Image (cartoon, grey):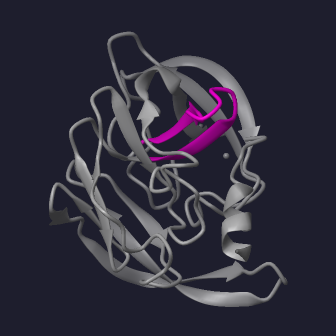
Amino acid sequence: MIRLFAALLMVLVFRGAAWPNDTADCSGTDRVAPEIIMKMIVPSGAMKPTLVKGDRLIVKGYRENTSPSRGDIVAFLLPQDNSTRYFKRLVGLPGDRIQMIEGALYINGTAVPRVRDGEDVIEDASGASTKVPRYRETLPNGVSYDTLDIDPNGFEDNTPVYEVPPGHLFMMGDNRDNSQDSRVLSAVGYVPSENIIGCVLLE
């Protein structure tokens, strides 16, 4: 219950440099417009280790006739109310089958490669520090980034298969056991393309 409450803090109030240790930086690509749509501050650790609480972010829109790419960190409006702003990593495209098995991400029946990449430190609700495994994950298009997995058999580490509907996207947080994302259909679920605000970058 404590973990789920912490995940709820991912509702945004919301550094453009590249993400540390991340190839999913959409800046400098022809998909993203130069104008800044909004600025935000990270309120929680749901995207740790890529983003940490207090990081300052900017959001840039996607150009006309372009779309988010797998691995982008995307700002979007929560489908349940079309007003709350979230940001997560895009892992699933329309028609994809997404599943988590023992903490590993599967896309269309194939496990996304991941390798142990040291440890990170997180704090629980009481402020106590805990070391957790950090993994380097590489998506089918070559985008690579770090994730955290506190417990390979956590609440959202073993899921049914999610079939992403046409015109929708599947989003996940990098802090896999502390992120309310598309895996929770009743709270986030599949994100309609029209709910996309833009690509998230470090300020």
Indicate whether 36 appears above or below 25: above
Q: Quadrant of residue 72?
A: top left
Q: Nearer the viewer, residue 90 or 79?
A: 79
122 in magenta: no
| Location of residue 168 with respect to 89 vertically, above or below | above
Q: Residue at x 37, y 37 (%)?
A: 169
Q: Is residue 17 visible?
A: no
Identify the image quadrant of the N terminus. Answer: bottom right
Q: Which residues are magenta?
A: 72-89
Q: Position of residue 188 (x, y in %)?
A: 54, 45
Frontmost residue, 33 versus 186: 186
Question: What's the residue at 33%, 18% (across, down)?
Answer: 66
Query: Is residue 139 shown above or below 131?
Result: above
Let me know if residue 84 is in the magenta part.
yes
With 199 as the anchor, is 101 left or right in this view?
Answer: left
- Residue at image x 67%, y 73%? 3
Inspect this view and state whether residue 184 appears: yes
Farthest left residue in view: 109
Give the side of residue 201 with respect to residue 125, left or right. left
Q: What residue do we see at 27% from left, 29% from top?
A: 166
Residue 135 percent across, percent down from the top left? 40, 76
The image shows residue 27 at horizontal and vertical percentages of 47, 33
Question: Is 149 on the left-hand or right-hand side of 110?
Answer: right
